[in-house]
Image (cartoon, rainbow, N blue to C red):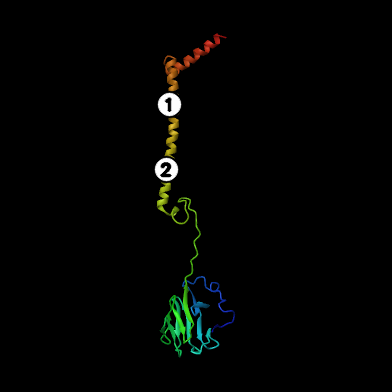
Amino acid sequence: RNRRRGGGQEGSWDLAENWPENRQIAMVKLLIKKEGKVIQELPVLPNKTYRIGRAPDSDWQIEHPSSSRQHAQLSLSDSGPILTDLGSAHGTTRNKTKLVGNSPILLKDGDVLVFGASTREYVVALETPIAPKAPATFNPLSGSSGGGGMGSSGNLAAVLRQMEEAKAASHATSGVKRKSGEDSLSSYVRRESELSGGGGLEGMARRAEVDREQKRQSR
């Protein structure tokens, strides 16, 4: 049976709560398997060396007659978990290959460890931390979330071009309306001038004066 030093229920340690926020390497666990089933999980925390063996003061005690009192040790480096067999009598294997005593090795995800002649397997599980997601931001120029926008010369140029086109279209429309009004006034003046016998605006004025005089005399 495997015991963790310090008491408490087996597998009750919350790895996420005890993991430093600024740690960049993957989270590490040892999954203890018996007959193909995971029966316990052991967290491997940074800044700590775990002593493995049959001794009662071991961090992970292995109660198997083939285990040495000081069988192996495990620590976590910036590169990953480091395992060292401490010259045990019955040895330590990784993926069925016996380790050389007192020679540290770097473990990889999925490595299967066996201490002595125990039938229990210790499987290395590396859990890569998930980076926090950047909050989505609305870009008023690109109309989308995320990158681009003001910092993108392509988006900025497109927006400025659209603004210039809209401005030109507005000017063209107002010009058409103004010209249409001017054309209507010119047509009216020309028509009235023809009715008054020519003379342009002066002829129209004379005709209007004659009309007023005729209305006065008829009263």
Q: Amino acid at mark 1?
A: Asp
Distance Cα–Cα, label 1 vs label 2 = 28 Å
Residue sitting at 43 percent across and 55 percent down? 148
In this rendered view, identify the residue nearer to me: 218 or 96: 96
Above or below: residue 12 compared with residue 166: below
In this rendered view, identify the residue nearer to me: 2 or 56: 2
Residue density around tag 2, few if under 14, some if 14–19, many if 20 or more, within 10 Å:
few
Q: In the drawing, does residue 39 fall left or right of residue 94?
A: right
**Count of marks, rendered view:** 2
Residue density around tag 1, few if under 14, some if 14–19, many if 20 or more, within 10 Å:
few
Q: Position of residue 219 (x, y in %)?
A: 57, 9
Helix, strand or loop under label 2: helix
Residue under numbered circle 1:
183
Q: Position of residue 6 (x, y in %)?
A: 58, 82
Q: Position of residue 211 (x, y in %)?
A: 51, 13
Mark 1 and mark 2 lie on one chain; the one further toward the N terminus is 2
**Which picture quadrant has residue 181?**
top left
In the picture, the quarter occupied by the N terminus is bottom right
Residue under numbered circle 2:
164
Above or below: residue 99 compared with residue 219: below
Residue sitting at 45 percent across and 84 percent down? 84
Q: Position of residue 59 (x, y in %)?
A: 53, 83
Helix, strand or loop under label 1: helix
Q: Amino acid at mark 2?
A: Glu
Residue 41 in sight here: no
Residue sitting at 44 percent across and 44 percent down? 163
Above or below: residue 119 compared with residue 174: below
